[in-house]
Image: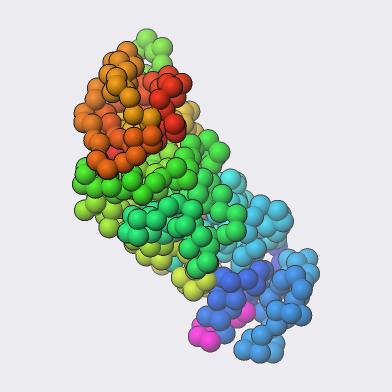
């Protein structure tokens, strides 16, 4: 990565070209669960090349800890840190405001940034990467996706020589815990959610997790870092897991499957609509939501609150990354690893970075300039699982089959387990592969049928 040397400043002795200090001065903004764990690592296992100089948080007097060295400055004044001579700012507040302003100001002043802020990177990552490059510093965000699982560092180093075309993952540990509990304990969704909240895996308002907002922000970051595509999280369709019932796992097992919240993105070239010359355009197919996956697949074997990411490359094939996706300690390890990476690049000096010697590529280098995606789509072509709850009466299957035939949908199988109340009877129809856009008009027509007592649950079947 090209290095621009900042103008000398009386307040920034560390930036004076060849006279820069060999010690990287670090300020930590945010002393919550992850921030505290980061400080613990830096204080209990000190690296001679790193020095924690500032800790910034609201109500800072209540946050002070005896294990933090006495020469560390505790403050609630962000401005004092941004005007200081620190080399790296670690931002662990979360959210868009004020972290967005803090990160931009740090980069503008030539300070590198390490962050775990998925919402900020998902929405403004490309812009911040370009700002960092223009100021000759770095922004690293390996902890923003999958916590302690080193997915983004792998994209930066181990996989940057490949051309990735697909990324899929279990990116939200809360959803995976809830779905695993429904499956294994045969309990209702509401009870599994209460358990997750009691264990600290889910917030009191878990909407961001349950409805896919958290996972799609992470998927947008993976698309940026791995597929070199810039996509707003809001343009990725997210489906909730709230409608999943214990009976769905029984029917999934009949198909040798289980159910997981899957985030997936595939980059393809497709023919342009109304193209007379057969020209193609880059299209990113992206979606987050519950899916049926084979029980013996990597996704099917992931239990509790673990995360899994699979990448598909043109040359290297498929790669898998599994581990704890949340929690203070695993996330802190990812943050400190990013910090050490920044310090190593900094110690290499401008001349070595400019020549490319002994310097690993940063996320900024690996991401380069994102491609312009002209089309974002959730119109995947897959087999489908349709679960109905109905008041039993003659002719139900015939009426559903009539609607499906009218919409050119082919039924693959019909499953009905015995022993259920006829007033609330669950059964399943699976469909042969078809596009999402072809299926949904049929679902809208089915929703108006008088025997339907719940909306049809429609899940892709991934093979």
Give coordinates of residue 15: x percent, y percent.
65, 69
Q: Is residue 49 magenta?
A: yes
Q: Nearer the viewer, residue 280 or 265?
A: 265
Q: Which residues are magenta?
A: 44-52
**Residue 284's quadrant in the figure?**
top left
- Please say if 162 is above or below 117: above
Residue 154 left/right relative to 411 = right
Q: Nearer the viewer, residue 442 or 264?
A: 442
At horizontal 75% and vertical 66% (from top left) the residue drawn is 78
Give coordinates of residue 392: x percent, y percent.
34, 29
The colouring scheme, among rainbow, by chain, secondary structure or one colour, is rainbow
Q: Nearer the viewer, residue 289 or 120?
A: 289
Give coordinates of residue 59: x percent, y percent.
77, 73
Image quarter where the C terminus lies is top left
Residue 169 left/right relative to 58 = left
Numbered label tally: 0
At horizontal 68% and vertical 75% (from top left) the residue drawn is 55
At horizontal 38% and vertical 31% (from top left) the residue drawn is 390
**Residue 94's quadrant in the figure?**
bottom right
Q: Is residue 295 magenta?
A: no
Q: Nearer the viewer, residue 44 or 184?
A: 184
Q: Is residue 143 visible?
A: no
Q: Residue furthest top?
A: 276
Give coordinates of residue 46: x percent, y percent.
53, 85
- Please say if 423 is above or below 45: above
Q: Is residue 296 visible?
A: yes
Residue 318 left/right relative to 328 = left
At horizontal 30% and vertical 35% (from top left) the residue drawn is 427
């Amino acid at each position: 990565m090209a290095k621009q040397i900042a103008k000398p400043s009386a307040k920034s002795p560390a930036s004076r070209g060849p006279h820069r200090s060999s010690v990287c001065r670090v300020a930590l903004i945010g002393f919550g669960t992850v921030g505290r764990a980061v400080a613990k690592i830096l204080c209990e296992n000190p690296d001679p090349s790193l020095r924690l100089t500032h800790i910034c948080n609201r109500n800072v007097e209540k946050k002070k800890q005896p294990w933090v060295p006495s020469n560390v400055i505790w403050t609630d004044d962000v401005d004092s840190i941004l005007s200081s001579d620190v080399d790296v700012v670690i931002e662990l507040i979360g959210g868009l405001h004020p972290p967005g302003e803090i990160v931009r100001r740090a980069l503008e002043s030539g300070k590198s940034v390490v962050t775990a802020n998925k919402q900020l990177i998902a929405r403004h990552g490309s812009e911040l990467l370009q700002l960092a490059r223009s100021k000759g510093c770095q922004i690293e965000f390996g902890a923003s996706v999958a916590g302690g699982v080193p997915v983004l560092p792998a994209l930066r180093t181990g996989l940057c020589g490949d051309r990735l075309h697909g990324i899929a993952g279990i990116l939200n540990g809360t959803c995976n815990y809830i779905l695993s509990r429904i499956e294994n304990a045969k309990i209702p969704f509401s009870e599994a959610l209460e358990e997750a909240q009691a264990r600290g895996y889910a917030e009191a308002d878990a909407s961001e997790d349950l409805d896919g907002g958290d996972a799609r922000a992470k998927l947008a970051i993976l698309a940026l870092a791995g597929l070199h595509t810039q996509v707003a999280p809001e343009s990725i369709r997210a489906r909730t897991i709230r409608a999943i019932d214990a009976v769905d796992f029984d029917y999934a097992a009949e198909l040798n499957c289980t159910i997981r919240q899957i985030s997936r993105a595939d980059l393809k070239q497709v023919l342009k609509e109304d193209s007379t010359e057969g020209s193609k355009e880059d299209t990113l197919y992206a979606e987050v939501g519950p899916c049926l996956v084979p029980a013996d697949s990597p996704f099917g074997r992931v239990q509790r609150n673990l995360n899994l990411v699979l990448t598909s490359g043109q040359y290297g094939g498929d790669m898998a990354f599994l581990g704890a996706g949340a929690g203070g300690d695993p996330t802190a390890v990812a943050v400190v690893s990013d910090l050490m990476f920044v310090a190593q690049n900094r110690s290499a000096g401008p001349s070595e970075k400019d020549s490319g010697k002994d310097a690993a590529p940063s996320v900024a280098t690996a991401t380069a300039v994102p491609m312009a995606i002209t089309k974002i789509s959730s119109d995947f072509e897959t087999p489908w699982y349709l679960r109905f709850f109905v008041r039993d009466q003659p002719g139900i299957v015939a009426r559903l089959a009539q609607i499906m035939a009218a919409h050119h949908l082919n039924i693959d199988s019909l499953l009905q387990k015995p022993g259920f109340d006829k007033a609330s009877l669950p059964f399943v129809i699976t469909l042969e592969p078809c596009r999402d856009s072809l299926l949904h008009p049929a679902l809208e027509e089915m929703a108006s049928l008088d025997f339907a007592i719940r909306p049809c649950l429609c899940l892709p079947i991934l093979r």
